[in-house]
Image (cartoon, rainbow, N blue to C red):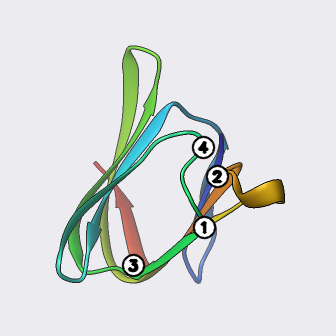
Amino acid sequence: MHVTVVSPERAVFDGAADAVVAPAYDGQVGILPGHAPFLALLGTGVLAVRQGSASSRFTIAGGFLQVVGAGGGGDAVRIVADRVEES
């Protein structure tokens, strides 16, 4: 799946990933390839984007996460955060 992480200042991550774990407003949410379309408000915490055995981690606050895809599959994950810092 393709993951994009952006803040008001810049694009922080744009690439392929195997999994995403994000701090939703009311708890952690995990996204895997093929996930159903989904929209969640983000809280504050650590966003992890896994690529094979490597993982990119960011501290985020506010914003939203959206899973979209053609034909109902989770082909893309968009994370638009109010604040993003690389961990």
Please state which amino acid type lies under the numbered disc 2.
Gly
Q: Residue furthest top?
A: 53
Tell me whether circle 2 and circle 1 mark residues in contact (CB < 8 Å).
yes
Other-residue count near label 3 (Cα within 10 Å), few / some / many at <14 / 14–19 / ≥20 = some
Query: Residue sitting at 71 percent across and 48 percent down?
Result: 75
Question: Which label is found at residue 26?
Answer: none
Question: Which label is found at residue 83?
Answer: 3
Q: Which residue does the numbered mark 1 point to in the structure image?
A: 37
Query: Residue sitting at 47 percent across and 41 percent down?
Result: 32
Locate residue 68 relative to residue 36 in the image: left or right.
Answer: right
Q: Earlier in the sequence, mark 2 or mark 1?
A: 1
Q: Position of residue 20 (x, y in %)?
A: 41, 46
Tell me whether circle 4 and circle 2 mark residues in contact (CB < 8 Å).
yes
| SS at badge 3 | strand
| SS at badge 1 | loop
Q: Marks 3 and 4: which is nearer the front?
A: 4
Q: Which residue does the numbered mark 2 point to in the structure image?
A: 74
Tell me whether circle 3 and circle 1 mark residues in contact (CB < 8 Å).
no
Tell me whether circle 1 and circle 4 mark residues in contact (CB < 8 Å).
no
Q: Which residue does the numbered mark 4 point to in the structure image?
A: 34
Other-residue count near label 2 (Cα within 10 Å), few / some / many at <14 / 14–19 / ≥20 = many
